[in-house]
């Protein structure tokens, strides 16, 4: 878990008290390499949820593969959604896993950061995007997004997908909201604790 504060997961918040925040936050001296099992073992997953009933005066949006179609990117290629409004971006929620996945995000409020503090290298402090199976706590990939406290327009980053098999996934902003997407390939064994993807009526070889 990467943040102090709030996490909205499709209409639900994660909240933590100051006492809970004190657990798991410490200066990290020998940080494991990102995207490895020792790194993911450091992440807190003590999410707590409540139904959102109050008014939220800020907005967050997450787009999947926002520059896939080169013609629509207007000659800007992979930078088509960087620093732009939604008119310059795309959203393709069905992907093939393997290569890193570009995602775009936008928030009209302050992005919390631990940079410049003794907790800068603690993977449980800061603002991140995380990849999860729908509603499940284990983190499959993450990327830090707090380098700019007040970003203008959409910003783009890349998430690792080599751990993903066919099925539904979500990108969680660990302050506010999620965005679902579907991995159509490759197929592989469902990870322990995972949910088997729905089986198509036709096999892949029989599909037109």
Image: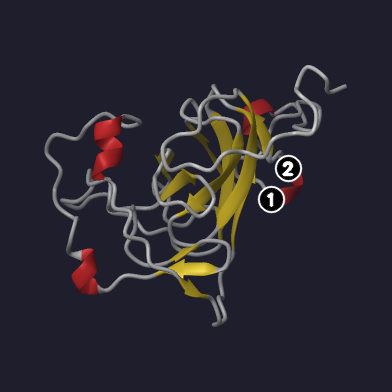
Classify 54 as above or below 184: below
Residue 153 in view: no
Q: Which residue is mark 1?
A: 85
User: Is 156 positioned to the left or the right of 32 in the image?
Assistant: right
User: Is 195 positioned to the left or the right of 28 in the image?
Assistant: right
Classify 166 as above or below 180: above
Residue 112 in view: yes
Q: Which residue is mark 2?
A: 88
Where is residue 128? Give x, y as percent: 41, 48
Residue drawn at (62%, 48%) of the image: 180
Residue drawn at (23%, 72%) of the image: 18
Q: How far apart are the alpha carbons under marks 2 and 1? A: 6 Å
**Figure colour scheme:** secondary structure
Q: Quadrant of residue 183?
A: top right
Q: Which mark is residue 201?
A: none
Near mark 2 (Cα within 10 A), the count class, few <14, some 14-19 or many ≥20, is some
Residue contact at pointers 2 and 1, CB within 8 angstroms: yes
Where is residue 32? Give x, y as percent: 22, 32
Most foreground residue, 24 or 144: 24
Residue drawn at (13%, 34%) of the image: 30
């Amino acid at each position: 878990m990467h943040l102090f504060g709030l996490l909205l997961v499709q209409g639900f918040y994660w909240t933590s008290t100051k006492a809970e925040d004190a657990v798991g936050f410490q200066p990290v001296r020998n940080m494991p390499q990102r995207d490895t099992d020792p790194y993911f073992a450091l992440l807190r997953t003590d999410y707590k949820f409540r139904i959102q009933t109050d008014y939220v005066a800020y907005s967050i949006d997450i787009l999947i593969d926002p520059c896939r179609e080169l013609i629509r990117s207007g000659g800007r290629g992979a930078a088509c959604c960087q620093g732009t409004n939604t008119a310059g971006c795309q959203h393709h929620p069905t992907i093939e896993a393997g290569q890193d996945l570009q995602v775009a995000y936008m928030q009209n409020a302050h992005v919390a950061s631990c940079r410049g503090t003794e907790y800068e290298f603690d993977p449980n402090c800061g603002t991140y995007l995380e990849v999860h199976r729908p509603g499940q706590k284990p983190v499959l990939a993450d990327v830090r997004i707090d380098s700019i406290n007040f970003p203008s327009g959409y910003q783009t980053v890349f998430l690792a997908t080599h751990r993903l098999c066919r099925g539904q996934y979500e990108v969680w902003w660990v302050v506010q909201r999620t965005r679902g997407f579907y991995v159509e390939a490759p197929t592989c064994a469902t990870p322990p604790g995972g949910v088997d993807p729905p089986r198509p009526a036709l096999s892949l070889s029989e599909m037109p």
